[in-house]
Image (cartoon, helix red, strand yellow):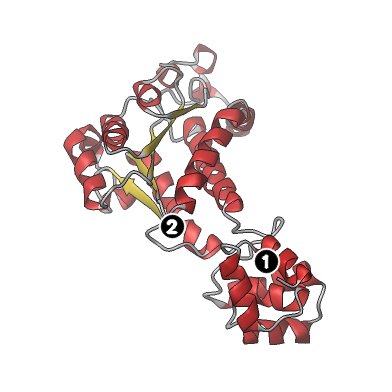
Amino acid sequence: MATESRRDDLSAIDGMGTEAIVLTMNAEDRTVAPAVGAAAATIAAAVDAIAARMARGGRLIYVGAGTAGRLGVLDASECPPTFNTDPQQVIGLIAGGPGAIRGAVESAEDDTRAAAADLDDLGLCPEDTVVGVSASGRTPYSVAAVRHAAERGALTVGVSSNPGSPLGSAADHAIEVDTGPELITGSTRLKAGTAQKLVLNTLSTVTMIRLGKTYGNLMVDLRSSNEKLRARAHRIVEMATGAGDDEVDRALSAGAGDVKTAILTILGRVGAEEAGRLLDACGGRLRDAVESAARGD
């Protein structure tokens, strides 16, 4: 496996100066983004399939062990504040359970029965998508989860850094980002982990764009749950509409802080109640609702 191979040219890295090691590591990290880009077509196909199922009420479920599991939990936990998703709409499962997020539970990655049980506990259904994440593509927990999900009729995606892996073979969509040997042999929290973070960012973000969770590149579905996010909501309404502070404040107040409603009341010249009706009719897609308001629908 490439992720377990040794870089002979780095065999004396411990004798290098500190800055030289930092620069070497930085040079290695710069190879990750192009490697992810090489998988763009496969990632896009997975996104379209995920979005179609989520539009019908399905969930996005990340499954992994160790670093891979933690990255899935991280991406899932960031979706509610960013896209106002229900906490149960994007879920991260990690081998060993919640305790493995903060501390290593190395043996848990071999527990294939737990993988199936963890998914069954969620009430897995055919509209769901299970994304198995594993640098090696061989982690028993992740591979078993994807196979079990496939048996249940769910969509499956495998994210790994070794082409032709068992995880990729088991999945409907195999996203295999070849990041090569690590700076420290086998330490896949490095380049492979960075690639996983980029891929998961892309899967969730582009899926949410496809689901109408943005207006252009503005986060119009964010949850204004603290002072920083309330200030961001104000700026987003301002950027989307060009309205002044007072008008933005009035629109946000009338829409109970909902950014989409505030933007639509300003751009569509409608009241908050009508804005809500239009958004519901357009499946929450703000651009469609703005165009509908302009037509007088």
Q: Residue at x 55, y 33 (%)?
A: 45
The quarter of the displayed image where residue 293 is located: bottom right
Report the residue marked by disc 1.
Answer: 289
* Image quarter of residue 265: bottom right
Q: Earlier in the sequence, mark 2 or mark 1?
A: 2
- Residue that sits furthest to the top in the current view: 8
The residue closer to the viewer here, 212 or 85, is 212
Q: Is residue 228 visible?
A: no
For the residue labelled by badge 2, is the local secondary structure a helix, a strand or a loop?
A: helix
Q: Residues within 10 Å of mark 2 (few under 14, many from 20)?
A: some
Which residue is tagged 2? 77
Instruction: Say if 262 sits above or below 155 in the image.
Output: below
Q: CA distance from mark 2 to mark 1?
A: 28 Å
Identify the element where label 1 is drawn. helix
From this view, report whether residue 204 is shown above or below residue 188: below
Percent x, y of residue 206: 59, 46
Front position in the image: 160 or 174: 174
Task: Check disc 2 and give the amino acid type.
Answer: Ser
- Relative vertical location of residue 234 with respect to residue 185 in this rendering, above or below: below
User: Residue drawn at (43%, 45%), measured in percent from left and top?
Assistant: 71
Instruction: From the viewer's perspective, tell me whether residue 59 is left or right of residue 111.
Output: right
Which residue is found at the position 26% from the left and 29% from the top? 140
Pinpoint residue 217: horizontal percent, then vertical percent.
70, 56
Q: Left or right: where does residue 220 sit relative to residue 110?
A: right
Whether residue 61 sits left or right of residue 284 in the image: it is left
Amino acid type at mark 1: Ala
Q: Position of residue 86 (x, y in %)?
A: 43, 63
In this rendered view, identify the residue nearer to me: 107 or 235.
235
In front of the other: label 2 or label 1? 1
Which quarter of the figure has residue 32? top right
Q: Pointer 1: residues within 10 angstroms few (<14), some, or many (20+)? A: many
